[in-house]
Image (cartoon, rainbow, N blue to C red):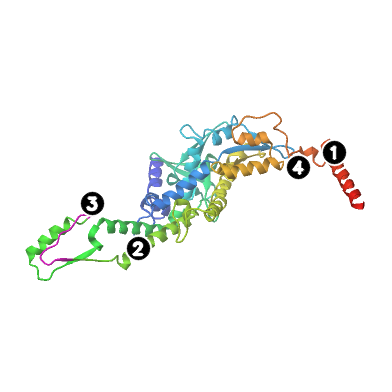
Amino acid sequence: MTNQQDLEKQRRLTLQDGKAWAGAFGTSNHAGKSVNLNTALQLSTVWACIRLTAQAVSCLPLSVFEKQANDDRVKVGNDENIAEVICDSPNQDQTPLEFWETKVAWMLATGNAYSEKVESTRRLLALQPIGSHDCHPVRRNDGELVYRVHDRGKTEDLPREKIFHLKGFGFGGDVGLSPIRFGAQTFGSAIAIEEASGRLFGAGLQASGVISATQRLDKGQREGIQEIMETFVGSSNAGKLMVLEAGLEYHRLALSPVDAQMLENHRFSIEEMCRWFGVPPIIIGHAAQGQTMWGSGVEQILLAWLTLGIDPICDRIEARIQKQLIRPTGNRRRYAEFNREALLQMDSTAKAAFLSTMTQNGLMTRNEGRAKLNLPRMDGGDVLTAQTNLAPLDKLGASTDGNSARAALRAWLSDQQDERTSK
């Protein structure tokens, strides 16, 4: 009975449990709007930033490699347990793309992503995802780190060895920082602007004009005009033709400065929210003032996003796989790595230039290049070649019969030219 009471006590929200209150009811802000994951995701900018970043990372192929004695790297097949889990089948329900998309989405939104490690005799069998709102690390009085998991009405403390924890940006400590929580002022203002603009356009005729009369109207006439005007109010009645009589005149009003400023603030809030997620506005389809949606400038912005936004996330995941999944097995020669070259998959020009450079400078064989295009291997395609007549690397600088003949012919022609000149 005592254990049950202790369990119920742990499940209750306390005044000191700020994270639980923030997740359930949102973080306070000057706009007076509740800001939590649910309300933030109703903003198209937040949805697009999280979706595009999570998709960009999850679509990259992930592989496990092992360092050899001569510093070569050999790819580990997916028949190995860790490679099979993280690269082929993380759990019974998800594909690798869905799993990593989920992890990156949670990390971007809350700063943390959790998965329970399912093991048997120290062999990793699966990674079961846990919602970030249902798990959080706790430091006990003795300094031991445990993870408190809420699952189907029950609360359980799991040891750190049972949890695979991805942490976002932070100042150290046991958790990453949530942009939605710390950006509550920005997101709260954006929610307020969305609601205000919705009311503005939902009111229809509210800011479009006024009716004036040349004579005083009695109560019945006012009520009659009011009934007529109500048939033109609302977005569903936009475009109807209004007929005025008895000296009534309609005066059109321009958009008030307050409303105009609200629309400008709406544009600015998009850029502000993008800053919290490190995504350039052009990536989500929002062009800044005077910026076009195409050209070399946008291409450079995209490269900057891949370098400063996508690559650091990949590095975080690779480091956590190394620390929490591979290192406990004792095999420190292995490591996981995303194939960043997959980002060139849809750019045929960039991909062709990349493969051409790699094969013509002795960094990749032609069969390795063909494999990246899903083409079959060819005989003689496993030799490294360089730009000098595409000769094998061990033949660079060596004299061949053809080179000797060409050199002799050039010398003979030079001698003949000298003789004619001397005569």
Q: Earlier in the sequence, mark 1 or mark 4?
A: 4
Q: Secondary structure at mark 2?
A: helix
Alpha carbon distance from label 2 to label 1? 80 Å
Report the amino acid beneath label 1. Ala
Instruction: Give residue 262's mark.
Output: 2
Q: On the image, numbered disc 3 is attached to which residue?
A: 236
Q: Secondary structure at mark 3?
A: helix
Of the 4 image quadrants, the one containing the N terminus is top left
> What predominant SS class does the magenta segment belong to?
loop
Report the amino acid beneath label 4. Thr
Question: Would residue 191 appear left or right of 162 to someone viewing this image?
Answer: left
Q: Earlier in the sequence, mark 2 or mark 1?
A: 2
Q: Earlier in the sequence, mark 3 or mark 2?
A: 3
Mark 2, other Cα within 10 Å: few <14 / some 14–19 / many ≥20: some
- Asked whether residue 259 is in view, the answer is yes
Q: Secondary structure at mark 4?
A: loop
Alpha carbon distance from label 3 to label 4? 72 Å
Depth check, mark 3 against mark 4: the one in front is 4
Along the viewing direction, whichever of 76 and 295 lies nearer the viewer: 295
Q: On the image, numbered disc 1 is attached to which residue?
A: 405
Alpha carbon distance from label 4 to label 2? 64 Å
Identify the magenta region.
Answer: 234-249
Query: In the rendered structure, does residue 317 fall within the stretch colored magenta?
Result: no
Q: Decide: marks 3, 2 in contact (CB < 8 A)?
A: no
- Location of residue 208 by image quarter: bottom left
Alpha carbon distance from label 1 to label 4? 17 Å
Mark 3, other Cα within 10 Å: few <14 / some 14–19 / many ≥20: few
Q: On the image, numbered disc 4 is attached to which residue?
A: 388
